[in-house]
Amino acid sequence: MGPVVAVVGGGQLARMMAEPAGALQIHLRALVEAADGAAAQVIPDAPVGAAGDLEAVAAVAAGADVLTFEHEHVPQDLLTRLIADGVNVQPGPGALRHAQDKIVMRTRLTELGVPCPRWAAVATPEELTSFGDRVGWPVIAKVPVGGYDGKGVLVVHDAAEAAHWFETDHGQILVEERVAFRRELAALVARRPSGQVATWPVVETIQANGVCAEVIAPAPDLPVHVAEDALDIARTIADGLDVTGVLAVEMFEAADGVLLVNELAMRPHNSGHFSLDGSVTSQFEQHLRAVLDLPLGDTSATAPWSVMVNLLGSELADPASAYPDLMAAFPDAKVHLYGKSVRPGRKLGHVTVTGTDLAEVRRRARAATTILGGTPA
Amino acid sequence: MGPVVAVVGGGQLARMMAEPAGALQIHLRALVEAADGAAAQVIPDAPVGAAGDLEAVAAVAAGADVLTFEHEHVPQDLLTRLIADGVNVQPGPGALRHAQDKIVMRTRLTELGVPCPRWAAVATPEELTSFGDRVGWPVIAKVPVGGYDGKGVLVVHDAAEAAHWFETDHGQILVEERVAFRRELAALVARRPSGQVATWPVVETIQANGVCAEVIAPAPDLPVHVAEDALDIARTIADGLDVTGVLAVEMFEAADGVLLVNELAMRPHNSGHFSLDGSVTSQFEQHLRAVLDLPLGDTSATAPWSVMVNLLGSELADPASAYPDLMAAFPDAKVHLYGKSVRPGRKLGHVTVTGTDLAEVRRRARAATTILGGTPA
């Protein structure tokens, strides 16, 4: 009864898909890295297997209405073979490659006329030097495949600082100008195979050490025309790349109000976690609806402001042990823990607070998260 | 990591506890009637066993921080033995017996001064006749133990109509005056072992054939003093009976504004399903917090009106097959299906719509549910 969605990946994103799946009687089947991981703790049908193992992915997709992802690490050739065997893969490999390879992404966005930082694909230190001399130092160097959350990204003041990357097997390196940005924004959209697109309000994302630390929805004091530009860019990318499911477009808002696209993610994304508690339809429900080609849900906000703060590491062996303090001090805080063991800086969970006074909402969300991190209320 | 809650029962109430359990990293373990039932579909740790089987209940409670329930069918002696063995049972058997036996409930509520319909416990047709002659015919006769959703309840115009109950093994029958009520209300509260109580706004419940069909939150046009009376009654019962977890108090609002208590449920209840989509803290999250003696969550509404409509049976073999129609017509409808096979009149799910215009919210919630029932949009 009900549709069957197979998802590759057993982390917090698959875990959070389980909530709307249960409500909508969608059978969720996750291919997980470990039997006791974040997703497997809450999904009964969670076989263990690797995202690169054709047999394992084919088995999880067997009988499912659609195969989708919580990360971008499923190889293209594997997806192509599954499609040849009749599997409905959403987003398809043609879209997904833009989230797998940053050079492919930059090339295609430039073709689409989407504003990006100046960039180049360089194969040698000399080419890097030439790029830096042209756009100004320092520049941002990125491993095109496999980086995330600040990993695989370097601020490079001199080609020598990236020399080790050229010595290893990365092939080309993506280099980008360092944008003098005012702040970072994210535009979240969902798109169905049949073309319907839904957007959430543009959010402000605040990073710490290359990792998302806080999200404010909607982005404060964002001029309406800039918000519209951001959503237009996201729609252009979703349509142009034939993205299905949720697409997060991370952007820089430059000092002069110009938007430049930073990164893409084709799956529910940290910048949309607020929607679990602050939107009529969360990004997790919307992703399931979109990949099943079901009509998309209402993305209206349920409160004027939502602030989400990530729990990045904790002094506590078990952050849930702080519930008595946290819940007494902040009865309105919506706590999400992912069932992961504590490691320094690890994304262990998040807290969302909603309300009408942004300063107070931010203060409460941060303070509640601090308690989970081990600081008493 | 995180607390462990064991719940007896594998229906939709345990199923809906899984959502907040996942968010709060609470390990939920359910003792279920069937391995493919509503709860077992979404809870990985769901051993099969009977609520009356001491060994099975003891096994599910082993190592759990608390044992709780989604129904009232665990025998008193079983619970007493578990407590003797050190199990933390919430609500305890001393509270739960008032939800298990309607005569015990009426006796205790009367002692507490809680307004009830006039009632008597009768053992013979002659006693029933005497009661009916005193309060006026027809009267309501109830099997004191085991009835639910209209089962075990009769409107009796003459003692002969209940004669078969006296012939079977029911012992005493509860008889109550038939109240000329204006409408039915429910007051939902949660209480921790340490005494904290939280209440939601009083709701109006609309029954069809003895089964809850629709809930409007808050109850429209309810005078403030009547709402306060209703919540006072619910608090009095929660405190007086030492209830822990969620308590639903179903009441009649008599034509003259007087409230009379009809039924009690000591668990999440159909009258509180709206809170999943219409409250900061749902009754399911609150129940988990309460039985774990954690500080209770904010019960504020997230919208002026929430209307929940039950899906009672369906012409469709799979109600989820109506999603394309339903979601296209009502993108704001929050659909909950319970993973149950279709039977006439069976509670298969519910739909909640929230908004600012009550008439429109009701229309949308009803129309969306109708589509799940098999009527095209």
Image (cartoon, coloured by chain):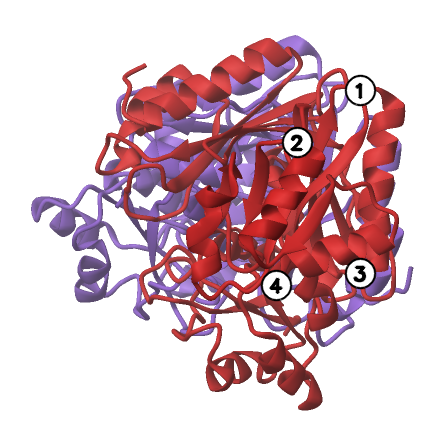
Chain colours: A purple, B red
Question: What's the CA distance linking mark 2 and mark 3?
Answer: 31 Å
Q: Which mark is residue B256?
A: 1
Q: Counting residues from the N terminus, which is met first, the one under dot 2 or under dot 3?
A: 2
Image quarter of the N terminus of chain B? bottom right
Tag 2 residue:
B136
- Tell me if mark 3 has few (under 14), some (14-19) or many (20+) residues whose alpha carbon lies within 10 angstroms of its own: many
Tag 3 residue:
B241
1 and 3 marks on the same chain: yes
Q: Given the image, on which type of amino acid does mark 1 rest?
A: Asp
Question: What's the CA distance linking mark 1 and mark 4?
Answer: 47 Å
Q: Position of residue B333 (x, y in %)?
A: 48, 25
Figure disc tally = 4
Q: Counting residues from the N terminus, which is met first, the one under dot 1 or under dot 4?
A: 4
Name the chain under label 3.
B
Q: In the rendered view, does A42 fall on the left or right side of B318?
A: right
- Mark 1 and 4 residues: CB-CB less than 8 Å, in contact? no
Name the chain under label 2.
B
- For the residue pair B34 and A95, the one nearer the viewer reads as B34
Secondary structure of residue under mark 2: loop
Residue found 43% across the figure and 42% down from its top: A267
Q: Given the image, on which type of amino acid does mark 2 rest?
A: Gly
- Mark 4 and 3 residues: CB-CB less than 8 Å, in contact? no
Q: Position of residue B78 (x, y in %)?
A: 58, 81
